[in-house]
């Protein structure tokens, strides 16, 4: 796949992150051995923020309690059946999925308005104890459908309403659903991309780009922008060098191309296992990127939804977690007239 460098960053003053509050959510000195944890989720419909702790607890905070500095941040805490690594709220804000790799628990969000909370569904994942969850994501349009990819490539698709589980072996390391939820894509351990139907049937494969002087690649994170365009983070599989954020274009007719924006988070070391997070804000044509070894959240934006450029912001957003202790709540303001 042909690779070119992306455009230079541009200054942008219309996007501002406003600091709200810092609050300690759990205490732990234990190292987190895996990569790619997702321990925060929210249900905007019910105004609830969920925080999972590595020692095996799940806390539900009222958003109004979190952002009001005059309040103590009262919350409900639930003991989990295993130490969690990933939590996620469904697209209709009604279901919360929690997993630590061996067990998938589905909660009803409305149950957290009561003191006694238990899963409405618990499923064994039946994967190797030596592997761990790389990514978990709900379908953005079908409320009860989610997919999990494990580090060893195991793909697990679950339909919560029927308790149906399907599983196949792949090379996947990260995943993202298409905007309409008709397919999902995995970024793979060999740098390729694979599109799957919800029944886990492979539909299309995209070759790996020739990054890092031809060294073998692995994909760390992926965001499905549109039918033929993806944001993908690649890492050199042979060393600890900094990853590269790319935009991969896969036109229906013609060869796939790749724009390399390099490490947009300006990561400062490799103290933690390398991982990247990509969060797309489709209505604004924004992609927020954060690195496990970076102190900034970077912004990549598009005026037309096709051509992307990195924005240099006056006020940067710090990582959501700092040593697993503090969650930062910030408001985001943007002048949408420019997009």
Image (cartoon, helix red, strand yellow):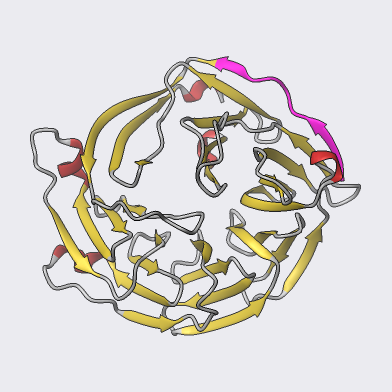
Towards the viewer: 311 or 44: 311
Q: Please say whether residue 3 is one of the residues in the magenta stretch.
A: yes
| Left-right relation of 230 to 256 | left
Q: Please say whether residue 202 is one of the residues in the magenta stretch.
A: no
Q: What residue lies at 34% left-to-right and 55% top-to-bottom?
A: 30
| Left-right relation of 324 to 257 | left
Towards the viewer: 150 or 97: 150
Q: What residue lies at 8% left-to-right and 34% top-to-bottom?
A: 70
Please tell me whether residue 239 is drawn above or below residue 159 in the rendered image.
above
Query: How many marks can you see?
Result: 0
Q: Residue 332: x percent and y percent?
A: 38, 30
The answer to whether residue 158 is seen in the rendering is: yes
Q: Residue 119: x percent and y percent?
A: 28, 76
Please tell me whether residue 277 is drawn above or below residue 314 in the rendered image.
below
Towards the viewer: 32 or 234: 32
Q: What residue lies at 42% left-to-right and 20% top-to-bottom?
A: 315
Q: Residue 105: x percent and y percent?
A: 36, 75
| Left-right relation of 30 to 102 | left
| Left-right relation of 170 to 249 | left
Magenta residues (range): 1-11
Towards the viewer: 82 or 51: 82
């Amino acid at each position: 796949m042909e690779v070119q460098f992306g455009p230079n960053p541009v200054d942008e003053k219309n996007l501002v992150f406003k600091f709200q509050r810092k609050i300690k959510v759990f205490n732990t000195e234990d190292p987190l051995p895996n990569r790619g944890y997702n321990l925060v989720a929210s249900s905007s419909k019910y105004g609830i923020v969920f925080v999972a702790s590595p020692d095996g607890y799940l806390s539900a905070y009222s958003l109004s309690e979190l952002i009001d500095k005059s309040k103590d941040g009262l919350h409900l805490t639930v003991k989990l059946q295993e130490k969690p690594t990933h939590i996620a709220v469904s697209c209709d804000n009604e279901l919360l999925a929690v997993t630590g790799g061996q067990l998938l628990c589905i909660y009803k969000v409305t149950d957290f308005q009561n003191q006694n909370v238990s899963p409405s569904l618990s499923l064994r994942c039946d994967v190797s104890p030596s592997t761990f969850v790389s990514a978990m994501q709900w379908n953005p349009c079908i409320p009860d459908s989610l997919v999990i990819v494990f580090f060893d490539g195991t793909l697990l698709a679950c339909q919560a309403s029927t308790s149906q589980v399907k599983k196949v072996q792949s090379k996947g390391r990260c995943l993202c659903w298409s905007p309409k939820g008709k397919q999902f894509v995995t970024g793979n351990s060999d740098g390729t991309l694979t599109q799957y139907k919800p029944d886990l049937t492979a539909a299309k494969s995209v070759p790996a780009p020739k990054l890092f002087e031809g060294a073998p690649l692995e994909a760390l994170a992926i965001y499905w922008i549109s039918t033929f365009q993806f944001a993908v983070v690649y890492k050199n599989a042979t060393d600890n060098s900094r990853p590269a954020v790319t935009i991969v274009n896969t036109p229906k007719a013609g060869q796939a191309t790749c724009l390399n924006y390099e490490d947009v988070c300006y990561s400062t070391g490799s103290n933690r296992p390398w991982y990247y997070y990509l969060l797309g804000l489709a209505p604004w044509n924004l992609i927020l990127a954060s690195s496990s070894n970076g102190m900034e959240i970077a912004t990549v934006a598009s005026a037309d939804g096709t051509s992307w450029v990195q924005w240099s912001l006056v006020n940067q957003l710090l990582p959501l977690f700092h040593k697993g202790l503090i969650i930062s709540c910030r408001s985001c303001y943007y002048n949408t007239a420019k997009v």
